[in-house]
Image (cartoon, rainbow, N blue to C red):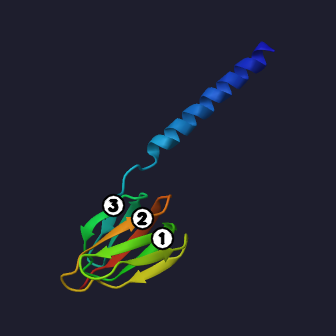
Amino acid sequence: MLRKKLILITSGVLVGAIVTLWAQQQPTTTQRIPQFDNSSVKVWKTIIMPNQPLNMHRHENGRVIVALQGGTLTVKPDKGASKKLTWETGKAYWLDADPPGEMHGDVNETTKPIEVMVVELQKK
């Protein structure tokens, strides 16, 4: 009986440690994680946390977005109306370069993080 209790307690402690370690590795802020770049492409992973906008920025070149964890994003340009983009997990999307001089911010207004891999083509 004592052995069973020790096994249960040890198992509970181990599960608790694993859950704690996993939680510590999960991002808590919106971030851009560079992967690599060369003369042909620039690749990064973006994690957009709920209600944490990406700062205003622009894309000089067209890019492919691969949704690792999809969701709906609101794109808020510095000029003009906002628009919503919905990305399904596991699907890829094409986004054109931004118009000259235009900046935009992105906001995840959902309750779960959105994760995308971005492959931006570089001009030769």
Question: Which is more N-terminal, label 3 or label 1?
Answer: 3
* Rendered location of residue 50, percent (x, y): 43, 58
**Left or right for 9, reference 30:** right
The residue located at (71%, 18%) in the rendering is 6
The residue tagged 2 is 108
Describe the element under mark 2 as helix, strand or loop.
strand
Using the image, determine if residue 14 lies above or below residue 31. Answer: above
The residue tagged 3 is 32
The residue located at (56%, 38%) in the rendering is 19
* Rendered location of residue 109, percent (x, y): 44, 64
Describe the element under mark 3 as helix, strand or loop.
strand
Query: Which is more toward the observer, 47 or 86?
Result: 86
Q: Can you name the residue that lies furthest to the right here?
A: 1
Question: Which is more N-terminal, label 1 or label 2?
Answer: 1
The residue tagged 1 is 72
Q: Tell me the quadrant of the picture where the C terminus can be found.
A: bottom left
